[in-house]
Amino acid sequence: MVSRAPNGAAFSGPTAVLLQLREIMAQKKFLVTGSTGDTGGYTVEQLVERGHAVRALAHREDDRPKRLEKMGTEVVIGDFLKFNDVRAAVERQLNAPIS
């Protein structure tokens, strides 16, 4: 894996991965699937604490998505295995239709 720094320098290996992670974390909006599970829930918490806007795809309406909403997360109810549910969540995240 090769990545480029803002000054054009090329990096590979762990440095390239870190540069890519830095670029990803510079984004302000994230869509998190599996947001009501342990790993997804922790991810949402960390992103919100860092000031990012988060949309969470939750499988069903129960106490877990409500907890995410209280943190300031936008919750979309849907099934990750249903294409149209994921498409709707992504389109709303991008504010644009996907064709």
Image: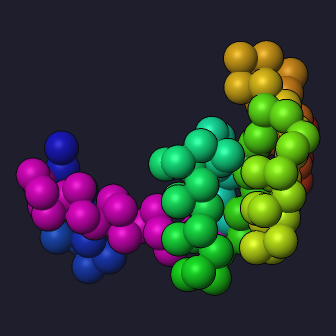
**In the rendered image, which quarter contains the N terminus?**
top left
Residue sitting nearer the eye, 66 or 9: 66
Residue sitting nearer the eye, 74 or 23: 74
Looking at the image, which residue sits at the far front? 63
Locate residue 62, reporting x and y percent.
Answer: 87, 44
Horizontal side, residue 90 vs residue 14: left or right: right
The residue under the point 14% across, 63% down is 15
The residue under the point 61% across, 61% down is 44
Locate residue 29, reporting x and y percent.
Answer: 68, 65
| In the image, residue 56 above or below residue 80 | below
Quarter holding residue 74: bottom right
| In the image, residue 43 above or below residue 81 | below
Q: Is residue 16 magenta?
A: yes
Q: Main secondary structure of the magenta part?
A: helix
The residue under the point 79% across, 25% down is 79
Residue 99 visible: no
Residue sitting nearer the eye, 67 or 7: 67
Stretch of the chain drawn in magenta: 10-28
Quarter holding residue 99: top right
Locate residue 5, reporting x and y percent.
Answer: 26, 71
Quarter holding residue 71: bottom right
Q: Is residue 73 magenta?
A: no
Residue sitting nearer the eye, 38 or 35: 38
Horizontal side, residue 12 vs residue 80: left or right: left
Locate residue 87, reporting x and y percent.
Answer: 81, 30
